[in-house]
Image (spheres, rainbow, N blue to C red):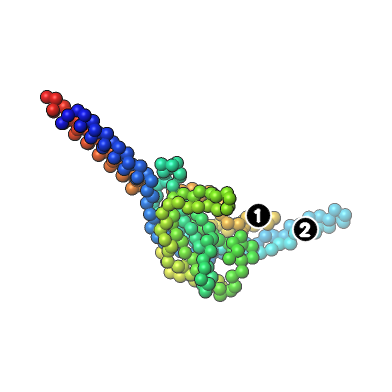
C-alpha cells in the first residue's frame, strides 16, 4: 500500500468518524411513556386569632380572627426515567422533562397544566392546589362529584423562547401521551396506576399570621434535571467511533510499515 493511499484512507476514516460523532450528538433518545399516579391530599390546619390591646381603652381585642385552612391539593407522582443531560453540537442543553395535561371528563379538549423538570428522585411529584384559591384556572370551579382526566408526556430536548409570541418552542423527542388517570372530587378514589410511595409533605405549623404560600404551586425552578451515572446512547456511540478510528489507524500504520520493509 502506497503512502498517498494510506493517507487518503486515514483522512476518509477520520472524516467519516467525525460525521458519525456529529450525528450521535445531534440525535436525542426518545423517552418512554410515563407511569404516574394522581390522588387527593389534604393537610388541614387552624390559624389562631391574633390579639392586641386597644390603644385608647387598654382592653384586649381581637385584631384578626382565627380561621381554618383546608390545604387541599391534587398530587401527581411520575415515575422518573434514567437520562443524562448534555449539550448538543449547537450548545443547547438537552434535558428530560414531563408535561401534565388535564380536562373535564366529558369535554373533548385538553389543557396543558404544567411543565416539570426531571429530578434525581425515583418519582417526580407535583402538588396542584384546587378550589377558588388555585392558580390553575381549570382547577378553580370543579364541583363536588366532578371528574377530571390527567395525562403525562415525557420530553427529551430543549425549549427556545419566542419573545414575539411569548411562547416556548420545544425541539426534541416526545414519548407520546400516557394512559388517562381519572380522579373524582368528593371522593378519595382515583384510577388504578403504578404505586409509588412519595413521602407526604408535612402539615404546615400554625402561626399567629396567615401563611403566605399555603396554596401556591411549588417552585419548578428548584427541580433540576437528573444526572444519573453511566453512559447513555450518545456517549456509547461517540466511544465506539473513537475506538474504530484508533483501531483502523493502527492497522493502516502497520500496513505502511510492513510495505517499507
In the rendered image, the vertical position of residue 157 relative to residue 42, given as above or below: above
- Which residue does the image show at 52% across and 74% down from the upper left? 106
Q: Is residue 50 left or right of residue 86?
A: right
Q: Position of residue 37 (x, y in %)?
A: 46, 64
- Which residue does the image show at 60% across and 57% down from the upper left? 216
Q: Position of residue 211 (x, y in %)?
A: 65, 55
Foreground: 151 or 3?
3
Around disc 2, counting alpha carbons within 10 Å, would you say few (fewer than 14), some (14 to 19), or many (20 or more)? few
Query: What is the quadrant of the C terminus in the image?
Result: top left
Q: Label 1, label 2: how many angstroms apart (C-alpha)?
A: 18 Å
The single residue placed furthest to the top in the displayed view is 261
Question: On the image, which quarter does residue 10 sit in?
Answer: top left
Along the polypeptide, which appears first: circle 1 or circle 2? 2
- Which residue does the image show at 55% across and 50% down from the upper left? 162
Q: Quickly name the residue at label 2.
A: 63
Foreground: 142 or 6?
6
Around disc 1, counting alpha carbons within 10 Å, would you say few (fewer than 14), some (14 to 19), or many (20 or more)? few
Q: Position of residue 236 (x, y in %)?
A: 31, 44
Query: Of helix, strand and loop, which one carries label 2?
Result: strand
The single residue placed furthest to the right in the displayed view is 56
Question: On the image, which quarter does residue 153 sit in?
Answer: bottom left
Query: Of helix, strand and loop, which one carries label 1?
Result: loop
Q: Is residue 136 left or right of residue 83?
A: right
Mark 1 or 2: in front is: 1
Residue 143 tag number: none
Q: Is residue 109 left or right of residue 241?
A: right
Foreground: 218 or 97?
97
Residue 212 tag number: 1
Amino acid at each position: 500500500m502506497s503512502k498517498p493511499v494510506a493517507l487518503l484512507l486515514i483522512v476518509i476514516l477520520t472524516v467519516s468518524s467525525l460525521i458519525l460523532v456529529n450525528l450521535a450528538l445531534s440525535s436525542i433518545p426518545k423517552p418512554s411513556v410515563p407511569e404516574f399516579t394522581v390522588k387527593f391530599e389534604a393537610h388541614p390546619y387552624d390559624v389562631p386569632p391574633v390579639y392586641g390591646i386597644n390603644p385608647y381603652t387598654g382592653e384586649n381585642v381581637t385584631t384578626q380572627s382565627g380561621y381554618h385552612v383546608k390545604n387541599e391539593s391534587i398530587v401527581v407522582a411520575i415515575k422518573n426515567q434514567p437520562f443524562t443531560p448534555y449539550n448538543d453540537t449547537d450548545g443547547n442543553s438537552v434535558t428530560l422533562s414531563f408535561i401534565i395535561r388535564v380536562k373535564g371528563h366529558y369535554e373533548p379538549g385538553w389543557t396543558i397544566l404544567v411543565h416539570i423538570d426531571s429530578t434525581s428522585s425515583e418519582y417526580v411529584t407535583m402538588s396542584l392546589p384546587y378550589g377558588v384559591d388555585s392558580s390553575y384556572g381549570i382547577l378553580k370551579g370543579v364541583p363536588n362529584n366532578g371528574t377530571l382526566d390527567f395525562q403525562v408526556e415525557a420530553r427529551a430536548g430543549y425549549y427556545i423562547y419566542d419573545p414575539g409570541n411569548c411562547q416556548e418552542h420545544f425541539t426534541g423527542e416526545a414519548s407520546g401521551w400516557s394512559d388517562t388517570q381519572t380522579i373524582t372530587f368528593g371522593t378519595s378514589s382515583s384510577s388504578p396506576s403504578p404505586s409509588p410511595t412519595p413521602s407526604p409533605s408535612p402539615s404546615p405549623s400554625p402561626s399567629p399570621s396567615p401563611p403566605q404560600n399555603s396554596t401556591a404551586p411549588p417552585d419548578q425552578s428548584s427541580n433540576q434535571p437528573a444526572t444519573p451515572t453511566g453512559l447513555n446512547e450518545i456517549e456509547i456511540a461517540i466511544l465506539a467511533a473513537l475506538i474504530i478510528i484508533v483501531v483502523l489507524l493502527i492497522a493502516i500504520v502497520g500496513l505502511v510499515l510492513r510495505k517499507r520493509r
